Image (cartoon, rainbow, N blue to C red):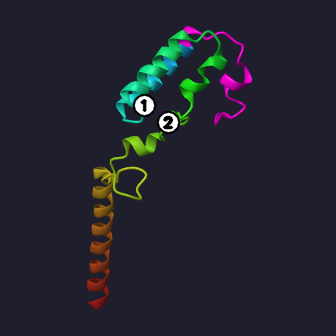
Amino acid sequence: MSELPISSPYRSKPAEPVSDDERDRLSRRLNAAFTDGALSQEEYQSRLDRLFAAQRLGELVPVVEGLPPLQTYDSPAIVDTGTGRPGELTEARSGNRVAVIAVGAVIGVVALIAILLVLIIAV
């Protein structure tokens, strides 16, 4: 019995012809599996021979069985491009220079007024 799910086109549509795109996709998967060490040289060559000899999708079941599963998702962009510290969604920004100067000026004026009031009341 096949380990492929019934939803697999190789089991659900076994009589359909094999397209060139399908051959290319499977060839890339076989190459990747061989490169990663999941297939021996003999197994790789045998599966390639079956792939290019197959006329119908059902004939490809022995080719795809046992191959590592395809990644069906992409990594989230935030994981790929994050440069901040862990827990930060964006990099910390330095304060706006004009805002810092304005706040400093306001604090200075308030302090000056407070000093003048203390001096006036003391006299």
Q: Are marks 2 and 1 in contact (CB under 8 Å)?
A: yes
Q: Which residues are magenta?
A: 1-21
- Identify the image quadrant of the N terminus: top right
Q: Is residue 103 above or below residue 82?
A: below
The numbered dot on residue 68 is 2
What kind of element bears circle 1? helix
- Which residue is pictured at 61% across the width and 11% down the height? 18
* Few, some or many residues within 10 Å of mark 1 (<14, 14–19, 20+): some
Q: Quadrant of residue 43?
A: top left
* Quadrant in which the C terminus appears: bottom left
Q: Position of residue 107 (x, y in %)?
A: 31, 68
Where does label 1 land, which residue?
33
Residue 27 image offset from top left, x and y in percent: 46, 19
> Residue at point 59% right, 9% down?
19
Q: Position of residue 28 (x, y in %)?
A: 44, 21
Q: Quadrant of residue 61?
A: top right
Residue 98 to residue 60: above or below: below
**Residue flagged by tag 2: what amino acid is it?**
Pro
* Residue that appears at 66% across and 19% down: 58
- Toward the bottom, the furthest residue is 122
Say few, some or many: other residues with alpha carbon within 10 Å of mark 2 (under 14 / 14 to 19 / 20 or more).
Answer: few
Please name the predominant secondary structure of the magenta segment in the image.
Answer: loop
Q: How many marks?
A: 2
Separation of residues labelled 2 and 1 (CA atoms): 7 Å
Q: Is residue 55 left or right of residue 23?
A: right
- For marks 2 and 1, the one nearer the N-term is 1
Disc 2 element:
loop
7 inside magenta stretch: yes
